[in-house]
């Protein structure tokens, strides 16, 4: 019996469009637009000037703050512009525009050969920081910060989040099928850094081939175990995943490290393996380009800074007018206003959704059907949170209805027959509470 | 269309909104029309059973409810949503709760009151505290008590009893006692059979236990109501009547209990939102029904039992919360 959690929803996973398609290496784009902010934390400042010639893997922007992550050139060429460009998460962001010289030349000394077993944990952490590792599942939290928990929070378990519970996305699935050994290496490195000897790989049951491949890759490696999880959204939400695998819930307002766990995404550990063994910074990633409006859905290995438009073109363009374009999955991804935004480190998917995919409908009053209450993996009353927001009762939502425990997984909105935009109301309430706290 | 052109189309018109970006295909109208459909067999049986007067009252209730809602929405400049089936359902449920012989203007008044006062003074769909159909019924009962307690006999009773009206089985029990009740059917087995199939006097839609059950099972299967509510409400009635020396099987099948338990104690707008809260609601409604039936002045108590529990629904929702993540282990 696969492990599961309370609540959750069962959307059609729509992974059939791309699950069987091998990762395709995209050609080097003529121009890349690389934002200096691709992570949670302090933005970087560009350290190159217009006219500079840069090599692939060269640092082009960095920051002094600990919670930040440097940015590297994703191909070789000439810096032609430093300007604000549309950004898939922050709206607009200072970006380094590089015109490719077509040579795709590595910066001096890369790639190198290194045996991770000979490195100290602190050295590895520094490599992870310098190579710009961030959580590639979408949250983009700097990996070196996550890998350096304070001493009073001992870590005993590492979890590889391979649930990939978002519908449509198959990037992690394909990486597991094609690079299972790299995943295991990355995991071993991460576990060494954290000093833990127990690691789990949580995979949803709808990927039996990935479960088999990962099981094979783990044979003979002590301490790493594949856990089969029930196919149910949001199985891969950090808190539900930890609850399911460890049997321990993260306390309200807490972080995984509070229960001795660190969770990383599949793409991230592969990037860690490449960074530590070959010195390669995070300059490309696997992204699923899919959705009802995409002609030929694919899993693409794309350079950071490739625009969505270029990626869509590589997939044969649109077969119908998209109503929404999303970065990430359909449940938690971000709607885009233009296709001119670049692929960043957290772009796990590009979805172009057609009219029939989105099914919005006019918003109606809550009829108190209770479906959102049943769906909420956090055990909240989402309907009430939406109603309180409509009444501007943001403080009540926080104090009496546990607003801040919401992980914004979107299960409530998915099941709502009144088509209420509950997550929108919740984000609004959180922002209002933050604003009120700032005033004090 | 070239590939470049295809990537450029309509990109100025992209919809931007908060996640999630996909939704299930449930909707309010789907739910409401499913409940209407679940009630249809019992309603049709009622027209077959009580004839033309039943048909007229069904039509009056439904048309009055929908027209009233239309006029109010128009007047208030709200989105025109009369097609969502909720006003239709209120009319249909009200009709199920009244005797077939009521003169047409009484259900008309009740239906208008249900929609205009019970539903729209509170803010319309989703905001009403009380079940509108039951408020409509209570309104008619308070206004025309005699007409509301004069029950036509059903088709198969014609010739077996004197006259064209009869007390309901619960009425006979209240006024004449259990022996007379059983005698009115012939014997106990016949009584159970008649109650189950609907061969008895009563409100238009409450008589056929079997058809109401079939509709209820359909709604449980569709996930629109939870099985716990009707099962626990009816079970509470059975257990308490047995405890007080009554005939549990009789009480469970008579009056408006099955209709109320499956179709009104499950009205999502007016009952608690958590399953736990709904169980408390069902126990309370069942207990109040028994209290009114056995101790009160009225022979039947389902309507008031549910309305009284509607009053405490906000309180239940304040006190009974889902189990939070992190609080289970």
Image: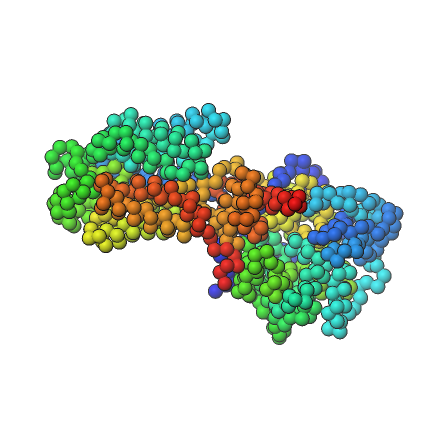
Number of numbered labels in the structure image: 0
Q: x and y percent of residue A107 in the render?
A: 84, 59
Q: Nearer the viewer, residue A21 or B62?
A: B62
Residue A264 against residue B92 in the figure, above or below: below
Relative to B39, B293 lies left or right: left
Whether residue A410 is visible, yes or no, is: no
Q: Residue at x 16, y 38 (%)?
A: B157
Left or right position of A189 against B226: right
Q: Position of residue B231 (x, y in %)?
A: 32, 51
Q: How is the image coloured?
A: rainbow
**For residue B145, which quarter of the picture?**
top left
What residue is drawn where x is 19% and y is 37%?
Answer: B154
Foreground residue, A428 or A34?
A428
Relative image position of residue B278 (x, y in whole percent): 39, 49
> From this viewpoint, is residue A94 visible?
yes
Relative depth, front residue between A90 and B147: B147
Write the residue at 29% across / 36% down.
B96
Direction from residue A192 to residue B313 in the image, left or right: left
Farthest-out residue, front: A440
Q: Quadrant location of residue B176?
A: top left
Q: Pick the quarter of the image with the N terminus of chain B.
A: top right
Q: Which residue is painted at 69% across and 38% down in the image? A: B8
Residue A52: x and y, percent?
Answer: 87, 50
């Amino acid at each position: 019996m696969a492990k599961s959690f309370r609540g959750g929803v069962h959307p059609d996973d729509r992974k059939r469009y791309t699950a069987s398609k091998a990762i395709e290496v995209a050609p080097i784009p003529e121009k890349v637009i690389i934002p200096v902010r691709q992570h949670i934390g302090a933005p970087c400042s560009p350290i190159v000037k217009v006219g500079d010639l840069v090599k692939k893997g060269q640092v082009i922007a960095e920051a002094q703050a600990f919670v930040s992550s440097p940015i590297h050139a994703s191909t070789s060429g000439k810096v032609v512009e430093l300007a604000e460009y549309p950004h898939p998460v922050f709206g607009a962001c200072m970006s380094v525009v590089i015109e490719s010289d077509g040579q795709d030349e590595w910066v001096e000394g890369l790639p190198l050969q290194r045996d991770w077993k000979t490195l100290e944990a602190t050295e590895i952490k520094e490599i992870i920081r310098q190579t710009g590792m961030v959580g590639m599942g979408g949250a983009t939290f700097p990996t070196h910060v996550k890998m350096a928990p304070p001493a009073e929070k001992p870590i005993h378990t590492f979890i590889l989040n391979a649930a990939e519970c978002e519908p449509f996305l198959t990037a992690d699935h394909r990486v597991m099928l094609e690079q299972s050994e790299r995943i295991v290496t990355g995991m071993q490195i991460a576990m060494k850094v954290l000093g833990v000897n127990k690691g789990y790989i949580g995979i949803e049951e709808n990927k039996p081939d990935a479960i088999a491949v990962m099981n094979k890759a783990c044979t003979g490696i002590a301490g790493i175990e594949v856990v089969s999880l029930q196919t149910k959204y949001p199985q891969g939400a950090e808190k539900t995943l930890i609850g399911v695998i460890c049997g321990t819930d993260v306390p309200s307002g807490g972080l995984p490290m509070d229960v001795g766990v660190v969770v990383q995404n599949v793409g991230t550990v592969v990037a860690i393996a490449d960074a530590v063994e070959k010195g390669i910074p995070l300059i490309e990633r696997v992204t699923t380009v899919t959705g009802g409006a995409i002609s030929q859905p694919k899993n693409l290995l794309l350079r950071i800074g490739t625009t969505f438009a270029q990626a869509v073109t590589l997939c044969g363009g649109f077969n119908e007018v998209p109503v929404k374009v999303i970065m990430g999955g359909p449940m938690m991804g971000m709607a885009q206003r233009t296709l001119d935004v670049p692929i960043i480190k957290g772009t796990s998917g590009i979805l172009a959704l057609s009219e029939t995919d989105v099914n919005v409908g006019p918003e109606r009053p809550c009829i108190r059907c209770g479906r959102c209450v049943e769906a909420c993996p956090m055990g909240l009353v989402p309907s009430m949170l939406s109603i309180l927001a409509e009444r501007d009762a943001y403080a009540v939502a926080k104090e009496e209805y546990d607003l801040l425990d919401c992980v914004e997984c979107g299960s409530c909105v998915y099941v709502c027959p009144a088509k209420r935009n509950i997550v929108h109301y919740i984000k609004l309430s959180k922002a209002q509470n933050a604003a009120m706290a700032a005033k004090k | 269309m070239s590939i470049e052109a295809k990537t450029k189309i309509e990109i100025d018109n992209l919809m931007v909104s908060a996640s999630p970006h996909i939704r299930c295909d449930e909707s309010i109208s789907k739910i409401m029309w499913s409940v209407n459909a679940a009630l249809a067999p019992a309603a049709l049986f009622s027209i077959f059973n009580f004839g033309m007067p039943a048909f007229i009252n069904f039509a009056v209730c439904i048309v009055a409810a929908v027209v009233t809602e239309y006029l109010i929405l128009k007047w208030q400049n709200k989105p025109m949503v009369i097609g969502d089936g909720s006003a239709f359902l209120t009319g249909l449920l009200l009709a199920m709760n009244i005797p077939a012989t009521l003169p047409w203007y009484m259900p008309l008044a009740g239906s208008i009151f249900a929609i205009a006062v019970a539903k729209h003074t509170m803010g319309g769909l989703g905001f009403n505290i009380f079940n509108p159909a039951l408020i409509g019924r209570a309104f008619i009962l308070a206004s025309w008590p005699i007409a509301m307690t004069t029950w036509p006999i059903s088709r198969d009773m014609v010739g077996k009893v004197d006259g064209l009206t009869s007390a309901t089985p619960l009425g006979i029990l209240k006024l004449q006692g259990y022996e007379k009740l059983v005698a009115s059917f012939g014997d106990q087995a016949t009584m159970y059979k008649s109650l189950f199939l609907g061969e008895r006097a009563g409100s238009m839609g409450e008589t056929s236990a079997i058809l109401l059950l079939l509709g209820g099972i359909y709604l449980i299967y569709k996930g629109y109501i939870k099985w716990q509510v009707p099962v626990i409400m009816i079970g509470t009635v059975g257990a308490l009547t047995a405890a007080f020396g009554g005939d549990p099987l009789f009480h469970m099948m008579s009056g408006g209990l099955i209709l109320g338990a499956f179709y009104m104690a499950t009205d999502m707008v007016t009952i608690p939102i958590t399953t736990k809260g709904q169980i408390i609601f069902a126990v309370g409604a069942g207990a109040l029904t028994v209290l009114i039936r056995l101790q009160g002045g009225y022979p039947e108590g389902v309507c008031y039992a549910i309305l009284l529990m509607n009053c405490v629904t906000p309180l239940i929702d304040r006190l009974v919360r889902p189990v939070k993540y992190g609080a289970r282990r």
